[in-house]
Amino acid sequence: MVTIDNNHNHLNNVPKTNDAYPSEKETELELTKQLLEKEAKIAQSDKAIKNNQKQLKHIENSKTWQYNKPFQKLSGYKKEQNEYIRHLEEKLNETEQVLHETKEENKRLILDSRKPDANKMEQSVNEAKNNGTLLAYLGDLIAQKNQHDANYNRALRHAARLFMNEKQDYRNLVYASVMAGLKMEDIPEFMVRAGLTNDISLRPTVSFRSSLNRRMRQLQLTGLLPEWLLDDKRTAYKFADELRLRRPWTSTEIFSMTNLPEKSGIVIKPADGAGSRGVYLVQDNNDIVDMKRSKKLDNWDDLKANMRQNLETGWVEKDEWTIEELILENDRTPASDIKFYCFYGKVGLILEIVRYPELTYCWWTATGERVRTGKYDEDLFKGQGVTQQEIDSAADISMKIPAPFIRIDFLRSADELVFGEFTPKPGNYDDFNEPTDKWLGDCFAEAEARLTQDLINGRQFVAYNRLTSWK
């Protein structure tokens, strides 16, 4: 198994990538940042000194100063004058501090004039829904957000333009900082152009969620994408058979609750369902597991009662059910799920799920590191991991599908992984944290480039093409 050391309890926040700077690069960036800040402070100090010298010269040339000059030699007056000057200096310091605080507050107010509170905004949305003004409220809310974003974008782009003709190290540092605050579609062309010719990462221009959103728009426009052909379970099993993958046996018949066969060693699923809702593992008539609720049922009557409840609550839409082979990890333990996030020949992430007796998750990279991704962070456990052979097998399967991304799901049996299904659009893919979203966005972009090049070179997807002929 590809796992981490048993004594290693730390979970990385994001997988390591080519954009991760080594320590020397981080040191160089930090020194450049300090140098930029110090030069700015020196310039500011020079300006302040010149202003002070100018004001001092103006005072010395004034009539009041010339008139009082003879009396300044008097010690009593000088002492009193010094006291007065100290008093003025104290007042000046207090005024400068208040002025500084006021300026800082003014900066914050300029950046965010309303300081919106998310909880209050949600409460306002609820109130608008209840009094029938939600659409009007949403219009105002969206207009406010768009203006808010436009102000930020304008300020950030202005900051970048200020350094267009500065030293390359300074410009690169500022550009990288500005990019981190802009959405991919808001990054101006002159910064992207600089990224192509200088040492500036264009990672902010990619996003896994944006890539999948765009893929869904393509599906909407064209009606079919290659990976979506495999979303159908029967077609997916046909493709698995073409690739000689082990998969569960399935019944072609659709059952209702009244004619469902009371068999042992089966899985009962909604005919048109997805996920674990309405899925039951039947080891025997007295040992049944409700997968969604992670709950054990004692008999067939309890099963029927739960199925009826699923229909009444809308968890399952129709009284139509299929059965398939039950895969166990050992004699009595239901198989865990192993889900490979595949990017045309490469595995990015691996999700390991144990559903019973409680639902827990473990994320892995293809190099065997456990990571946090922002999804399921509250329910993580240390899983078993996967073998390099299993990773290579999943990557090889994805190479046979002409699509930049697909998730390939397996069940872990006692001796091998058993194919489950293809998932072109994982649920809640927007829950990944920003570093993971950017990293997977890189994986997606690289996969698109590899796929395009293979298509140009005439690569034939033989098994997939046979599938489309059968379909």
Image (tube, rainbow, N blue to C red):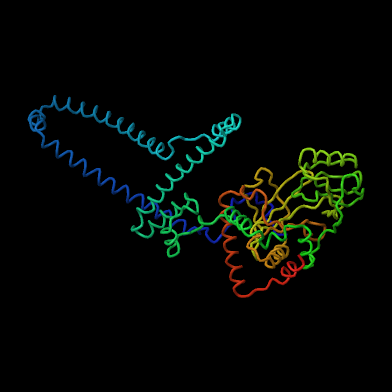
Looking at the rendered image, the quarter that the N terminus falls into is bottom right
Q: How many marks?
A: 0
Quick check: 166 left or right of 48?
A: right
Quick check: 68 left or right of 405?
A: left
Quick check: 147 left or right of 383?
A: left
Looking at the rendered image, the quarter that the C terminus falls into is bottom right
Locate residue 121, reporting x and y percent: 54, 34
Residue 189 appears in which quarter of the rendering?
A: bottom left
Locate residue 363, reporting x and y percent: 67, 52
Residue 193 appears in which quarter of the rendering?
A: bottom left
Looking at the picture, tell me which residue is in the foreground, 47 or 451: 451
Locate residue 434, reporting x and y percent: 56, 50
Looking at the picture, tell me which residue is in the foreground, 41 or 409: 409
Residue 65 appears in which quarter of the rendering?
A: top left
Quick check: 357 left or right of 43?
A: right
Residue at x-position 78% and y-position 56%: 412
Locate residue 390, reporting x and y percent: 73, 63
Looking at the picture, tell me which residue is in the foreground, 99 or 120: 120
